[in-house]
Image (spheres, rainbow, N blue to C red):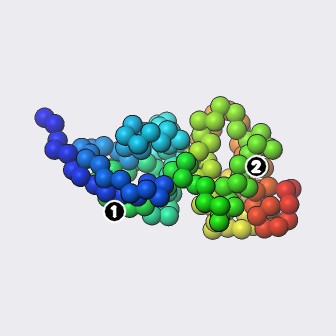
Amino acid sequence: MASEAVTITLSVNGEVTTQAVEPRTHLADLLRMRLGLTGTHLGCEHGVCGACTVFVDGATARACLVLAVQADGAVVETIEGLTDAADPTLAALQGAFVARNALQCGFCTPGLLATAVEFLREVTTPSRADIRERISGNYCRCTGYHAIVDAIEDAAARLAGRGPT
């Protein structure tokens, strides 16, 4: 038996959108399939791999665990929307990820970047242990994490005016 659609309105990457969704539709599916924002990746669909990490009302969330109806009235920001020139965090992370070869296939990268952006907005001088703890909920099957930790450490140093390590 099909569920009746529910109309929701949310802001996605600065644009207000109104969508009719079934109550069981996950935010990740809305973002990817309806809105074409394919930077939100679906990995495990159980909230443990971090590939679907987005910002909901300023805090990271697993889009595979959030129902679209729960995001009614929310401000959602995906990797495609993290381009605010006033916040240099993403640019520093992207540069460091490239310089440190902290990405390979790229599947985990949007979720890791979202996690790292939130982290570096909160902690300006993280230790390597802090970085490892924060990204522990993001799986990467290609890099072995060492380069990712190096990249986040370099971005933190650059943002603090110390230059890369």
Q: Is residue 91 visible?
A: yes
Q: Helix, strand, or loop for circle 2? A: helix
Labels 1 and 2 touching (C-beta < 8 A): no
Front residue (pair 136, 42)? 42
Q: Residue furthest left?
A: 1
Tell me the quarter of the picture where residue 144 sits. top right
The CA distance from mark 1 to mark 2 is 33 Å
Q: Which residue is the site of mark 2?
A: 95
Question: Above or below — where is 98 with respect to 61?
Answer: above
Please provide percent x and percent y for residue 131.
69, 56
What quarter of the picture does the N terminus occupy?
top left
Amino acid type at mark 2: Gly
Amino acid type at mark 1: Gly
- Which residue: 26% across, 45% down? 21
Please provide percent x and percent y for residue 120.
67, 62
Please report whichever mark, 1 or 2, sits nearer to the chain's N-terminal start. Answer: 1
Question: Above or below — where is 114 with respect to 85?
Answer: above
- Which residue: 36% across, 53% down? 17
Q: Which residue is the site of mark 1?
A: 73
Please provide percent x and percent y for residue 70.
32, 56
Question: Above or below — where is 101 with respect to 84?
Answer: above
- Which residue: 39% across, 37% down? 33
Q: Helix, strand, or loop for circle 1? A: loop
**What number is the disc on residue 120?**
none
- Which residue: 75% across, 61% down? 156
Please provide percent x and percent y for residue 24.
27, 44
Q: Is residue 14 left or right of residue 154?
A: left
